Image (cartoon, helix red, strand yellow):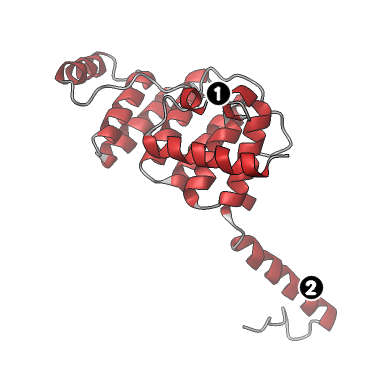
Amino acid sequence: MPCALPTPFAPASTTRAVCRLVWLLGMLMVLPLAAQDLPPLDARYDQADPAARWVQRVDIDNATERAALDTSLRREGRNPVLRLQSAWMHADRGMRQRIERDAEAALRLSEEGSLTRRMVHYNYGWIRFHLGEFELAKAQWLQAYALHGGQPDWVPSHFALLLWSQGDRETALTYYAKAAESQPTQWGREADLDAATADFGPNERLAMQSMHEAWLRDAP
């Protein structure tokens, strides 16, 4: 579609400027995911984050554990950690509507700016990731990263995994390289990936192993 004049009397220079602006806006709309809203690659990412841990998950095949969580929720329904545990349980059972109910409740009930709020965002990101909802996982992890306010060490590996899972292998490897630089014992040349991915699912473990191998081939 040709770029229209802003007014019937606009000079040619104005028309060119408007067309240029329209073109730039169009390019921004079609930029790949990797170019938008991702943590910078020039940070060190060497700070431990106590919020970057999974809450204890309920064994969905264990009726006693499920009942114990239900009892705790009846007693402490406004406990954000319990609501987060419930969201994980519903995720493991594939009950999507209940996931959102409990995860959003955990966010509302956690104190703004607190470690618990960060932990909820971090876990909610993993829940969304396991459901294959990568954009929503990204949003939660970005919130956890932003609330940390520093350079948490989990960021490069998690965003590498996210991008790899979305098919952006090139950008994923740049984040993996940063992870290997920031945490060489976990992701570097001599890393023990079995230990580093012990809590990961089989698909995530395979993705990290594939990235490690690809990074080794290209690493100087």
Residue ID for mark 1: 113
Looking at the picture, tell me which residue is in the foreground, 74 or 42: 42
In the image, what residue occupies the spot 73% across and 86% down?
8
Q: Where is residue 42? Give x, y as percent.
A: 74, 37
Find residue 178 and report its horizontal and vertical position in percent. Answer: 66, 35
Residue type (three-letter) at the residue carrying disc 2: Ala
Element class at badge 1? loop
Residue at image location 38% in from the left, 35% down from the top: 202
The span from disc 2 to disc 1 (Cα, nearest Å) is: 43 Å
Apparent side of residue 93 relative to residue 159 in the rendered image (left or right): left
Q: Quadrant of the C terminus?
A: top right
Q: Is 197 positioned to the left or the right of 159 in the image?
A: left
Q: In the figure, residue 18 lies in which quadrant?
A: bottom right
User: Is residue 55 in view from this perspective?
Assistant: yes
Q: Is residue 37 visible?
A: no
Q: Compared with residue 86, is residue 16 higher up or lower down, i.e. above or below? A: below
Cβ atoms under marks 2 and 1 closer than 8 Å: no
Answer with mark 2 or mark 1, whichever residue precedes in sequence.
2
The structure residue drawn at horizontal position 66% and vertical position 84%, both measured from the top left corner, is 2
14 horizontally vs 174: left or right: right
Q: Badge 2: how crowded within 10 Å, few (<14), some, or many (20+)? A: few
Q: Residue at x 25, y 18 (%)?
A: 73
Tell me: residue 63, above or below residue 105.
above
Give the camera-side residue of 92 and 202.
202
Q: Which mark is residue 32?
A: none
Q: Residue furthest bottom?
A: 8
Pick out the residue farthest to the left.
63
How far across and down, in percent of the image, does residue 19 sit? Answer: 73, 75
* The N terminus - image quarter: bottom right
Query: Please, what is the three-letter code of the amino acid marked with disc 1?
Result: Gly
- What crowding class fits label 1: few (fewer than 14 Cα within 10 Å), some (14-19), or many (20 or more)? few
Residue 17: mark in rendering: 2
